[in-house]
Image (spheres, rainbow, N blue to C red):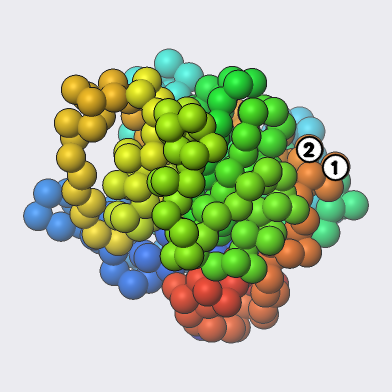
């Protein structure tokens, strides 16, 4: 831990006291040196050190820059979450409405312009997208708004229909959020996969009709049995493990939809003939959570998820390394939240 200055706020900026901050799997992979963050022969580094990490958070307003109160409808003491990316509002993607793909890509906790929440105080910059949160939502639950919004975006990308058989691979924080969001779409069958039975129990509480442990059964064969040998219509990958990608391609029915929403620690290979000539699959990549924060806030406020089972650990900020270890192991935790 180190001491840093309390951020100064300018026009349309907000200073908050951080109430809670979650540790994302991306944070843990970044800390471990994943090329996605630190670059390799084919891509430049994304991280701009020195930077304070943390993009899953909730804060209490302690200072408002000129114009910020009117711009965001905020007052001192309000609880407020800021979307994880601070868009430039000037690049091609921002101007076309795809602000989550903004070219400067200032995500909290990775860039100098958007310092993160693993600190006592943090600043929401002038271009930030901020949402007021009811104080009735405990801070440790409100820190889950960001990952849940990502889960919602993945489900939206899947374009789930009433007759679909939907499989969600991985029952970590994102996967469980996907199960809860997909439940709202009312598919014909909603199936969750994970290698740990205790996480599958939580998936049932999030709305899964059927759960399977691929280490204990042939999940591909079981899905085919449930679908008259067609396969599932939608497969959402939330494990970040290469084997789950191959599994999904084989599990999907012809004309099915594969949504990828993970950060991988290493390259993944698969037979692309399955995607094209064999099945004519639709492949959708998911990133961040455009326009999904209000829905995430509503789901948590209305107790749509068993939050006491999802947030398995609440640690003081000083135990961040313990938290990172728990996230990397994953067998002992789902969501780890730090309390500054």
Q: Secondary structure at mark 2?
A: helix
Residue 323 lies in quadrant = bottom right
- In this rendering, is residue 24 above or below 85? below
Front residue of 200/238: it is 200
Front residue of 317/176: it is 176
Q: Residue furthest right?
A: 136
Q: Name the residue: 43% across, 18% down.
A: 95
Task: Read off the residue under disc 2.
Answer: 298
Q: Position of residue 73 (x, y in %)?
A: 79, 33
Q: Name the residue: 48% across, 19% down.
A: 97
Residue 125 lies in quadrant = top right
Q: Position of residue 296 (x, y in %)?
A: 70, 40
Q: From the viewer's perspective, is 248 left or right of 191?
A: left
Figure label count: 2
- In this rendering, is residue 154 above or below 14? above
1 and 2 marks in contact (CB < 8 Å): yes
Q: Circle 2: is it few (<14), some (14-19), or many (20+) Cα within 10 Å?
A: few
Q: Secondary structure at mark 1?
A: loop
Task: Read off the residue under disc 1.
Answer: 302
Residue 337 lies in quadrant = bottom right
Judge whether residue 129 can be spotted in this image: no
Query: How far apart are the alpha carbons under marks 1 and 2?
Result: 6 Å
Q: From the viewer's perspective, is 325 left or right of 62?
A: left
Where, quadrant-wise, is the C terminus in this rendering?
A: bottom right
Q: From the viewer's perspective, is 42 left or right of 58?
A: left
Q: Name the residue: 37% across, 71% down.
A: 31
């Amino acid at each position: 831990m180190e001491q840093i200055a309390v951020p100064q706020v300018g026009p349309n900026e907000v200073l908050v006291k951080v109430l809670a901050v979650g540790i994302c799997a991306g944070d843990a992979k970044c800390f471990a040196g994943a090329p996605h963050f630190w670059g390799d022969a084919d891509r430049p580094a994304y991280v701009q050190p020195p930077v304070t990490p943390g993009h899953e958070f909730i804060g209490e307003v302690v200072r408002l820059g000129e114009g910020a109160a009117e711009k965001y409808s905020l007052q001192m003491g309000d609880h407020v979450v800021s979307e994880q990316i601070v868009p430039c509002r000037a690049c091609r993607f921002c101007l076309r409405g795809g602000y989550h793909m903004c070219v400067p890509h200032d995500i909290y906790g990775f860039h100098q312009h958007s310092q993160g929440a693993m600190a006592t105080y943090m600043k929401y910059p002038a271009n930030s997208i901020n949402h007021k949160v009811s104080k009735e939502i405990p801070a440790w639950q409100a820190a889950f708004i960001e990952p849940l919004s990502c889960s919602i975006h993945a489900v939206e990308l899947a374009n789930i229909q009433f007759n679909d058989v939907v499989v969600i691979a991985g029952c970590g924080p994102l996967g469980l959020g996907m199960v809860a969001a997909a439940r709202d779409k009312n598919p014909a069958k909603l199936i969750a996969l994970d290698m740990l039975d205790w996480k599958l129990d939580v998936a049932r509480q999030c709305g899964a009709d059927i759960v399977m442990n691929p280490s204990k059964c042939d999940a591909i064969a079981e899905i085919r049995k449930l679908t008259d040998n067609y396969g599932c219509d939608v497969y959402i990958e939330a494990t970040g493990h290469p084997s789950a990608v191959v599994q999904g391609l084989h599990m999907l029915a012809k004309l099915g939809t594969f949504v990828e929403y993970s950060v991988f620690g290493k390259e993944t290979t698969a037979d692309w003939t399955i995607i094209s000539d064999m099945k004519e699959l639709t492949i959708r990549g998911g990133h961040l959570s455009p326009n999904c924060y209000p829905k995430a806030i509503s789901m948590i406020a209305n107790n749509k998820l068993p939050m006491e089972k999802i947030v398995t650990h609440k640690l003081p900020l000083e135990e961040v390394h313990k938290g990172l270890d728990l996230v990397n192991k994953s067998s002992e935790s789902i969501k780890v939240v730090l309390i500054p």
